Image (cartoon, helix red, strand yellow):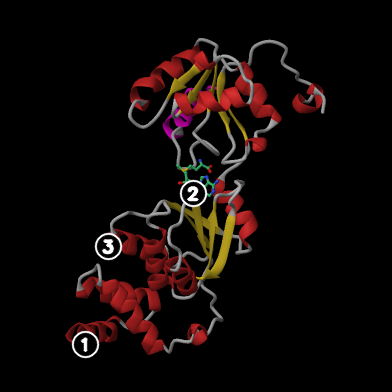
Amino acid sequence: MTSETLYGDSLPTRGLPAGLYIVATPIGNLGDITLRAIDILRRAAKIACEDTRHSRKLLTALTIPGPERLLAYHEHNADHIRPALMAAIENGESVALISDAGTPLINDPGYRLVADCRARDFLVTGLPGPSAPLLALSIAGLPTDQFFYAGFPPRKPAERLTFLQTLSQIPGTLVFLESPHRILRMVMDAATVYGDRQAALCRELTKLHEEILCLPLPALAEALSQRESLKGEIVLLIGPADKTQDSAQDGLSAEERLDEALQHALETLSLRDAAAMVAEALAHPRKDVYKRALALTKK
Ligand code: SAM
């Protein structure tokens, strides 16, 4: 591919135009860097990144010189560094923004910087590339006509259940990020709230031990509980409710499904909250569910 093909008919010969360049970087396999990303990282006056030590390794691996152009920009120093980056752009410099991996702003820093640059009418442009949530969607075999990116669920069990509950009516595939330490608990909670919806656990994407586990939520919870330990980075996808699906498909009667969901919810929620959550999730009358929850606690 020639330079002309890369840049159309506006081949830049010297420095880059002043502005902010959002540059995606690999999420595991270094070969996933794009030719444009390498070019912009070579030529940018400054490269804002989450962790300079981490990004220095990326530049070294890609044989991109000038590590002194790296500048840490993360949640703890963003308010202090952002004005300096804005001033650099105003003074005619090009600033590239990268994150530790994948596409900046997708669960990574950069939102305020982009918003502020836009408010000042600075050039803001992007160099697309890897992103774990999108890659997971494209290979999992779950519906992709509509999806909802939910990010990391809350760590506290009660908050997580409520969070999952608030997403239960979304008519598309749900996309979560989760740590390997919490994934089993998260999948168990998801099974409580969403029943036997189809799920895909996408682990270590683009890396040596890439693994995609496609199972209904209860079976996925069971499979994970058999594992001694689970390592690596994970995207969890949960397909939309299948309106035509028979609720007895997983072998449970409606009563058994109700009891199972209640028992799980009662581990972390009060009687009232557990009943309300399960009633909503399983579309049962709240009064009946409360009565059943009361009976279960007296057993
Ligand atoms: N901006 C990144 C992107 O576009 O992919 C996401 C950043 S987020 C802070 C990091 C999380 O993304 C990880 O904890 C994991 O849940 C997910 N992730 C990143 N790389 C991954 C990979 N190779 N395989 C599976 N999940 C990954």
Q: Position of residue 48 (x, y in %)?
A: 48, 23
Q: How many marks?
A: 3
Q: Is residue 123 visible?
A: no
Q: Residue at x 48, y 30 (%)?
A: 114
Q: Which residues are magenta?
A: 111-122
Please name the residue that numbered disc 1 is placed on. 295
Closest to the camera, between mark 3 and mark 2, is 2
Quadrant showing the C terminus: bottom left
**Crowdedness of circle 1 by 10 Å Cα count: few (<14), some, many (20+)?**
few
Q: Amino acid at mark 2?
A: Glu
N-terminal label among 3 and 1: 3
Q: Residue at x 33, y 64 (%)?
A: 161
Please name the residue that numbered disc 3 is placed on. 158
Could you tell me how far apart the alpha carbons at marks 3 and 1 are, in whole angstroms? 21 Å
N-terminal label among 2 and 1: 2
**Crowdedness of circle 2 by 10 Å Cα count: few (<14), some, many (20+)?**
some
What secondary structure is marked by label 1?
helix
Location of residue 68 with respect to 268 vertically, above or below: above
Q: Is residue 25 visible?
A: yes
Q: Amino acid at mark 3?
A: Ala
Could you tell me how far apart the alpha carbons at marks 3 and 2 are, in whole angstroms? 24 Å
- Horizontal relation, residue 267 to residue 97: left or right: left
Q: Main secondary structure of the magenta part?
A: helix
Quadrant showing the N terminus: top right
N-terminal label among 3 and 2: 3
* Magenta stretch contains residue 298: no
What secondary structure is marked by label 3?
helix
Please name the residue that numbered disc 2 is placed on. 233
